[in-house]
Amino acid sequence: MSKAIWKVEPDLEFIIAGSSTNCEKNAAGNREKANYVLTALNYDSGIKDDNKRRVHVASRRKHHRWRLDRSQVREYALASSLNPAVKAWWEDHRIETPELYFHQFRESSTFVTMICEDLARNDPCHEILRSIGPNLLFALLMDGPQLEERWSARYASSLADDPGSAVLTFTSYGLIDRMNKTERYPENRAIALWKDDSGDIQKILMPKEKMSCGVLLSLNSVLVEDQTIDGRKVKNRSWRFASQQPIVTDLKPAEA
């Protein structure tokens, strides 16, 4: 898929995507089914020849299982598939040694990806995050609307304040749409939330137009000066939210 994207957009620097299978094959030659985040970095922007392009692809598993309690089964309208009489449903996911990959792009920026529950668990990975202090953190969630008062925003704020990363949490609109159709809560289209070290919070909404299939975010970096614990002053890149625009498809909606 990444090769097809770079044929259209050769200047694209990296791709992040959630996946239900690993991009790497196991010892048996199979791609294991689990909850993964896939990352592909393009080190040769502008090159249209795939044979000359240097691409680094990495995949890692989620560190924690997702649990659905009875109230969530109702909120997400999953009772037709999951028995609401059961106290809790746990994700069928094998836990392995936690891993984090820090990806450098451009000259002085790094980003890291988190998956759902990993964002909320205060485990050794969070100590590493605070020690390295990536410029950008992307959190892929399977969650409801991304609002300031919800759990994802609280944990994003802690990482934006210390070590000062810009954090983007985003979720599937399909799950939000299921919640909206239950009409138990006011309709909401907040698929993502941006928080950075300046305190700026931006709520990203899925556009209402039927032909919209996503949102394009524009970011820009600024040079900021930080002071280390031993009194030294260092300059780092900090990323800021600039604007958002709907992504519109030219495909016609299916006939009723």
Image (spheres, rainbow, N blue to C red):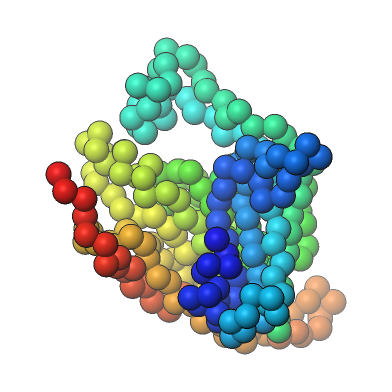
Residue most extreme to the top: 85
**Quadrant of res 120:** top right
Provide residue 8's location: percent of width, then percent of height. 48, 75
**Residue at 38 percent of width and 76 percent of height:** 243
| Image position of 186 with respect to 102: above or below | above
**Quadrant of res 64:** top right
- How many marks are shown on the rendered structure? 0
* Residue sitting nearer the eye, 50 or 64: 50
Q: Is residue 24 left or right of residue 89?
A: right
Provide residue 35's location: percent of width, then percent of height. 61, 41
| Image position of 185 with respect to 127: above or below | above
Residue most extreme to the right: 230
Residue most extreme to the left: 256
Residue 152 appearing in the image: yes
| Image position of 191 with respect to 151: above or below | below
**Residue at 62 percent of width and 80 percent of height:** 49
